[in-house]
Image: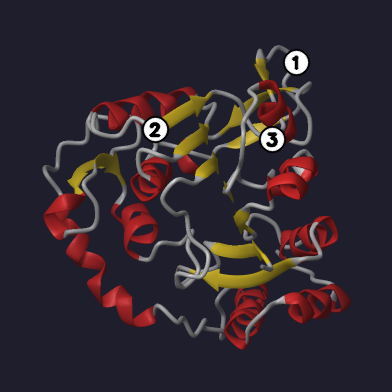
């Protein structure tokens, strides 16, 4: 399979990235994507931390996998990562809680009191991560519509009764709130199916969610929704302009997202500063970060 990028658009994105690390890693990630790892390796800023990958096993409580995805139970307090228990994958926990893939070098991060939109909450891993950061004065609006994911989400939430600032929203995020959809696949890689003729699942835009629920502020938006990130941004323009939230958005689901998402965000908010980071040794977990210039 061939992958194509427009060089002019790549150049435009590089011009808005705010530091050399972001520019170099952005270009490296694109080379890695195009080459399909044949001859190109990403020089990761976090490469030295991967030696601790297996340490996550120390947090495993058992090898009994009582859930649809064969995830093990982990107690992250055992390795001083967070006061959180959850069923999830070793790799997912490492990226979420150890590498903190939705934070950029402490420059862009969910903080105490923040209201967070967690787009693509899956089994509750990122919702719990954000909830721990924002504390009791903050709130996490976790968007997830896959039934098996929701079952495990609720199971994970129940094990963390000390956390009560998560609101589950059972809708897929999109550009509008009038489209009926279904899902293809399962788990963290499930995608939206727009060709379903009998689905009862309705999309929801961020702007409509904020307006209909009288949300007073949005401080942080995270989007990892398997290719629907661009369309979701189209339905979040007014909220972004009004609240100027910090943003962490995945780019790796489509080659075109590496350019069209940064350029769209720059069009919506020219006052944003942009950064890029990458959190695996493959092409996955490429994340664009944005923050309003003070």
Residue at image position (26%, 26%) is: 158
Q: Is residue 194 above or below residue 111?
A: above
Crowd band around label 3 with a 10 angstrom C-alpha radius: few (<14), some (14–19), many (20+): many
Q: What colouring style does the render use?
A: secondary structure
Whichever of callouts 1 and 2 sits on the residue coming sooner in the sequence is: 2
Q: Looking at the picture, how far across and down is residue 170, in whole percent? A: 54, 23
Q: Which residue is mark 1?
A: 197
- Number of numbered markers: 3
Residues at marks 2 and 3, CA–CA distance in whole angstroms: 19 Å
Whichever of callouts 2 and 3 sits on the residue coming sooner in the sequence is: 2
Crowd band around label 1 with a 10 angstrom C-alpha radius: few (<14), some (14–19), many (20+): few
Q: Looking at the picture, how far across and down is residue 64, in whole percent? A: 15, 36
Instruction: Determine which of the numbered discs, if any, sits on residue 165 in the image.
Output: 2
Q: Is residue 123 above or below residue 180?
A: below
Instruction: Determine which of the numbered discs, if any, sits on residue 57 in the image.
Output: none
Whichever of callouts 1 and 3 sits on the residue coming sooner in the sequence is: 1
Judging from the image, what secondary structure is the residue with disc 1 in? loop
State the quadrant of the N terminus.
bottom right
Q: Residue furthest right?
A: 8
Q: Which residue is mark 3?
A: 206
Residue at image position (52%, 43%) is: 116
Q: Looking at the picture, how far across and down is residue 181, in whole percent? A: 69, 24
Residues at marks 1 and 2, CA–CA distance in whole angstroms: 36 Å
């Amino acid at each position: 399979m061939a992958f194509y990028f427009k060089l002019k658009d790549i150049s435009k994105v590089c011009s808005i990235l705010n530091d050399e690390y972001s520019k170099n890693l952005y270009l490296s990630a694109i080379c890695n994507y195009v080459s399909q790892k044949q001859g190109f390796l990403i020089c990761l800023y976090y490469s030295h931390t991967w030696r601790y990958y297996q340490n996550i096993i120390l947090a495993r409580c058992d090898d009994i996998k009582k859930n649809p995805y064969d995830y093990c139970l982990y107690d992250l307090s055992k390795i001083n990562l967070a006061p959180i228990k959850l069923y999830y994958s070793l790799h997912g926990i490492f990226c979420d809680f150890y590498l903190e893939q939705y934070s950029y070098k402490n420059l862009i991060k969910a903080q105490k009191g923040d209201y967070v939109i967690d787009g693509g909450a899956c089994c509750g891993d990122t919702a719990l991560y954000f909830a721990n950061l924002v504390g009791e004065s903050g709130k996490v609006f976790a968007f997830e519509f896959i039934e098996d994911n929701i079952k495990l989400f609720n199971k994970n939430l129940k094990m963390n009764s000390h956390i009560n600032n998560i609101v589950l929203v059972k809708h897929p995020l999109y550009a509008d709130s009038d489209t009926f959809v279904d899902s293809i696949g399962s788990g963290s890689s499930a995608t939206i199916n727009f060709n379903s003729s009998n689905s009862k699942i309705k999309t929801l835009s961020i702007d409509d969610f904020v307006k209909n629920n009288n949300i007073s502020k949005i401080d942080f938006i995270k989007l990892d929704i398997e290719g629907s990130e661009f369309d979701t941004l189209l339905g979040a323009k007014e909220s972004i302009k009004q609240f100027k939230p910090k943003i962490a958005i995945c780019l790796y689901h489509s080659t075109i997202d590496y350019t069209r998402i940064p350029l769209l965000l720059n069009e919506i908010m020219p006052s944003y500063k942009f950064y890029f980071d990458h959190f695996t040794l493959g092409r996955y977990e490429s994340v664009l970060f944005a923050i309003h210039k003070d």
